[in-house]
Image (tube, coloured by chain):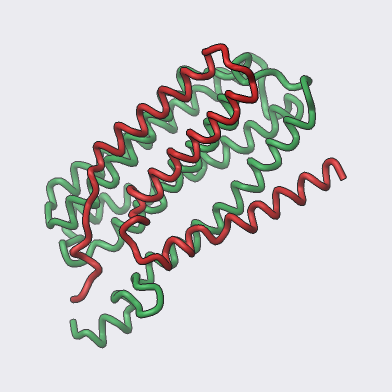
Chain colours: A green, B red
Amino acid sequence: MSVQAAAMEGRLPERGLGVYDKKVGMWIFLCSEVMFFSGLIGSYIILRFGAGNEWPLPGEVLNIPVTAVNTFILICSSVSMVKAYAAISQGDQAGLRKWLIATVVMGAIFLGVQAYEYSELINHGFTPASGLYGSTFFTMTGFHGFHVLCGVVSMSYITLKAFRGHYTKEDHQGVEVIGLYWHFVDLVWIILFTVVYLI
Amino acid sequence: MATEEGRKHPNYMAVWAGLAILTAVEVGIVYLGFSRNVIVMVLLALAVWKALLVAMYFMHLKFEPKAVSIVAASPLLPAAILIIFILFENFG
């Protein structure tokens, strides 16, 4: 492809920001997601610490050990994601596929454990209707889980493309960009876990 | 085709180890007998540290042009304003 054609397609680093279009687009999308989660988490913090002692302590209601392990699993999936990116940036197709599958599997495990957590909580009477605590908890973690689900679905698509040999050492923008989304989902969980489960 | 490559890859496993250790410290701190305010401050600092590790190394911000970091940091001020307004609405 000629340089002009590549530039027209937005595949070259632009002079302004120095990165290609897809990456700029993903970062701007992530900025909007920051606002989204800030609204939810900020509201939770204000409601909870304005309610004084009326809300139970997280440890009394939530399963901190299981969720801590789940947090670790999500962090591991971020590592496998970045290893997949590192692999394809060196042209290692086998490594790309291996690490992408690991990421999808660990993302799915995270979702499974969250679903299990939800069923346990609901069986013990803690539901989205359990006052402000219940509604804020399930809204925050539910929306995060939905983001993880979208990530797993997108990641599966990227993995399919990887198995079809769609990515090369020269062109693997899709892998990098989905990686950014995945790391963001992990980052939000890092904040969520600390604020909702530990504090 | 020109790309941004020639970029460096940090030691991802070292970052992973750091994240794992910070998570373990976070969970452990809750069960030690510090005062509530100390726990909250330490937990928030650790969470920010972990978030920065993910952003700088996994999301490659450390190795991108500075302009990308500016874009990435740009929602923090509006987010702070949002939260301040929620605060005033609840307690104003």
Image height of B22 relative to A21, above or below:
above
Q: Nearest the camera: A140 or A35? A: A35
- On the image, the x and y values in percent for residue A81 come to 29, 45
Residue name at image x 77 percent, y 20 percent: A53
User: In which quadrant will I find the N terminus of chain B?
Assistant: bottom left
Residue name at image x 22 percent, y 84 percent: A3
User: In which quadrant will I find the C terminus of chain B?
Assistant: top right
Q: Is residue A143 left or right of residue B22?
A: right
Q: Nearest the camera: B54 or A169? A: B54
Residue A113 falls in which quadrant of the image? Answer: top left
Q: Is residue A54 left or right of residue A31?
A: right
- On the image, the x and y values in percent for residue A60 come to 63, 14
Q: Is residue A77 left or right of residue A25?
A: left
- On the image, the x and y values in percent for residue A12 come to 29, 76
Image height of A117 relative to A88, above or below:
above
User: Which residue sits furthest bottom?
Assistant: A4
Figure label count: 0
Image height of A21 relative to B73, above or below:
below
Residue name at image x 16 percent, y 62 percent: A168
- On the image, the x and y values in percent for residue A135 come to 70, 32
